[in-house]
Image (cartoon, rainbow, N blue to C red):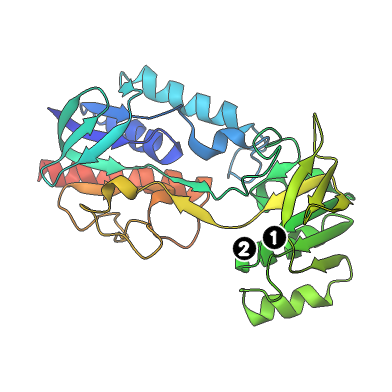
Amino acid sequence: MYDIIIVGAGPAGLTAALYAGRANKKILVLEAKAYGGQIVSAHEVSNYPGIQSISGIDYATNLYNQVIDLGVEVKFETVLSITDDREVTTNKEKYQAKAIILATGAENRKLRIENEEELVGKGVSYCATCDGNFYKGKDVAVVGGGNSALEDALYLSDIVSKVYLIHRRDEFRGEAKLISDIKKKENIELILNSNVTKINGTDKVESITVNNEKEIKVDGLFIAVGQEPKNIIFKDVIDVDDKGYIIATDEVHTNKKGIYVAGDAREKLLRQLTTAVSDGSIAATVAIKEMEN
């Protein structure tokens, strides 16, 4: 019997493990792939308070080592299901806990086109605020039609030389104010009724192909077509919203006693490194407090 089982070894899950480990609780962290979550693909993290600059992989490794040094048990197994009475089944074993913290995160929705995976971190990005400063004075493209894509294009327009904003429809889905602001920007060119069909380049992004015919030379491609929570295996046990994010209170309770959620897996306004570690620390603290009471 574990005190707390944490599902996911991204920043939220590892922070929860750090706080729970320092409280001398018996902790098990279960991770399907590798520790770190989405942050490991960030070339540079420069918006985390108190850390001027660090690579995503270095940040994740430092946090992981902190957790390991506390004696927290980490197993790389795929969680298949959880139950109301806090039993966790993986591809290898079954475990029981007094509390569960779900920190499975979310993943950026991919375009699923040629060279996308190969050039992540080499010109392909899913976070304009994270990576925009690397493209000062250069030409970039943003693909997407919602608020995130519009906000990314506006943010980048103040940094880069030119932004190509590419959307598959003839109208944007974002807010009217954002659309109005976009149209006022002289260095944003709209390319509507269009899809990016290929990313060109070997060691870095050199250009993109639109609609299988038009080539546009850019140094970076920012993909903003939404995120997908990795919560599908929990939806029959835990309440989720219409997008699949876990519904939670400010103190990260789910609708089931003893089951909490932290990080990008839950419904929230902002999904950033700062909010992930905040959720993780809250989840561990609340779980321990309620367990002891």
For numbered disc 1, what is the local secondary structure?
A: helix
Please name the amino acid that badge 1 sits on: Asp
Number of numbered discs overlaid on the protein picture: 2
Task: Classify residue 107 as left or right of residue 13.
Answer: right
Task: Tell me if mark 2 has few (under 14), some (14-19) or many (20+) residues whose alpha carbon lies within 10 angstroms of its own.
Answer: some
Decide: is 192 above or below 69.
Answer: below
Q: Nearer the viewer, residue 105 or 50?
A: 105
- What residue is disc 1 on? 152
How far apart are the two marked residues, 2 and 1, measured between alpha carbons?
A: 6 Å
In the picture, the quarter occupied by the N terminus is top left
Which residue is at 41% across, 62% downward? Answer: 243
Decide: is 192 above or below 200.
Answer: below
Decide: is 249 above or below 17.
Answer: below
Which residue is at 38% across, 17% downward? Answer: 69
Task: Tell me if mark 1 has few (under 14), some (14-19) or many (20+) residues whose alpha carbon lies within 10 angstroms of its own.
Answer: many
- What residue is disc 2 on? 148
